[in-house]
Amino acid sequence: MAETTQLNPGVDDDIARIGAPSGDATLAIAGFTEEGENLSEFNDGTAQHGLKKHSHGNAPVIPEASRGERLKSYNLADFPVLTGREEDWRFTPLKRLRGLHTESLDGAGPTVSVGGAANIQVETVERTDPRIGCAAIPDDRVSAAAWAAAPVATVITVPAQTTADSEITVSIRGKDAAPAAQHLIIDAQAFSKAVVVLNHQGTATLAQNIEIRVGDGAELTVVSVQEWDEDAVHLSTQQARIGRDARFKHVVVSLGGDLVRLTPSSVFTAPGGDVEMYGLYFADAGQHLEQRLLVDHAVPRCKSRVTYKGALQGKDAHTVWVGDVLIRKDAEGTDTYEVNRNLLLTDGARSDSVPNLEIETGLIEGAGHASATGRFDDEHLFYLMARGIPEKEARRLVVRGFLTEVIQQIGVPALEEHLSEAVERELAAGNL
């Protein structure tokens, strides 16, 4: 599987970093100094002629091209009607959204039940509750529509300095295909520790907003599992705000549904934060699974790692991964790396992978990204078959090994076992 990386192709992934000290010839990148980018005489750190420079070159682009300058609003009217030509929607088949971008979201929506840990607080609150909006602002039309339409919100609170006595399980069960909206808030208060698992099942046409607040010194893991029925349509915005010295792990597992589009984001609000974002997706014939994520390094001395892996099989199976990492001017000491890898198991499948890295300061520890899409490695298959393993079983072993890295990051043994079995069913369904 051939890999392409946007930075120093001759340098190992682990050291392909922007902003290395200029005296280090191995890590230096032409045009960058310890003070930042200097590729053009016009780039003096201020806006020129109303244009903004992209971090990978000196070609001017309109300000909206910067991930940090995208529109955010609670008002649906601020977002134009979608045409499919927008950058954020160009991969998404709008005709398959079943009205989430055009209709009133007044369906009953999936039911929500919370179980597991006994020492947490679960509430259903009205839209006027001050906690709504604590961690997120809609940044696309569907998210804004869901914000306006959701009549209530489910709030899950892990009290300060509390460790949840077991995994918090949130069962989201859909029984109605009418377009609907849903709002959830997960609030891990200062120095708390918890694991929250979101299980999406059944059928639905759902626009969902999930706000996640990780308090100072807190440790929170959120696992979002999409095992919908094959006709479900699910668009989910999952925004997290990370406090001082907090640790946040976000894991996405998308297996079911007709069209599933998730837009997770992590925004650092104070120094010392640490974020890990993992994703696993397995698309079958005709299925569309899309992930668009953002890591916003807005403050100094924070670290992020992103790893997403996908497998595809069958005609018109389609996956999309867009990974945006934004390092703002004040985010000195940032350390970040993102990678996406996709394994095409059959002909007729398509994977789009777009890593984006935008850097506004060179005073960082490191930044890099990589993307790779390909079919089975013939050498791996030959190695296994040469040791007496039949080709069919060898192919399954390769896929298992490819995806297991993400499954093992969940940290919930029962869920890891369940997802491993689900991957086996996907492989069997494809007769791999």
Image (spheres, helix red, strand yellow):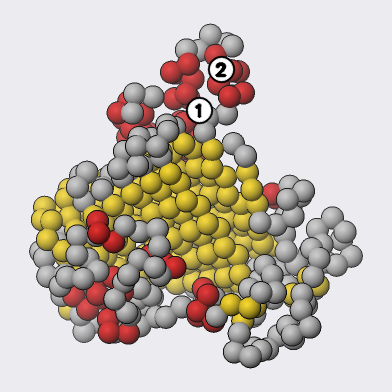
Residue in the image at 17% along x and 70% along y = 103
375 lies above or below 220: above
Label 2 crowd bin: few (<14), some (14–19), many (20+), radius 10 Å: some
From this viewpoint, which residue is outermost toward the top?
Answer: 388
Q: Is residue 152 visible?
A: no
24 lies above or below 243: above
Count of marks placed on residues: 2
Which disc, if any, is residue 215?
Answer: none
Residue in the image at 59% along x and 89% along y = 50
Badge 1 or badge 2: first in the primary sequence: 2
Q: Position of residue 330 (x, y in %)?
A: 64, 80
Q: Toward which corner of the image does residue 306 lie, by quadrant? A: bottom right
Question: What's the residue type where badge 1 is placed?
Answer: Val
Q: Pointers 1 and 2 in contact (CB under 8 A)? A: yes
Q: Is residue 262 visible?
A: yes
Q: Position of residue 271 (x, y in %)?
A: 59, 74
> What residue is shown with label 2?
384
Instruction: Name the residue nearer the viewer: 239 or 165.
Output: 239
Instruction: Name the residue nearer the viewer: 396 or 155.
Output: 396
Question: What's the residue type where badge 2 is placed?
Answer: Leu
Q: Position of residue 14 (x, y in %)?
A: 70, 50
Residue in the image at 33% along x and 32% along y = 426
Instruction: Name the residue nearer the viewer: 84 or 177.
Output: 84
Q: Is 47 placed left or right of 32 in the picture? A: left
35 lies above or below 260: below
From this viewpoint, which residue is outermost toward the bottom?
Answer: 49
Q: Is 202 placed left or right of 404 in the picture? A: left
Q: Position of residue 201 (x, y in %)?
A: 21, 48
Residue in the image at 35% along x and 35% along y = 314
Q: Tag 1, which secondary structure?
A: helix
Which disc, if any, is residue 398?
Answer: 1
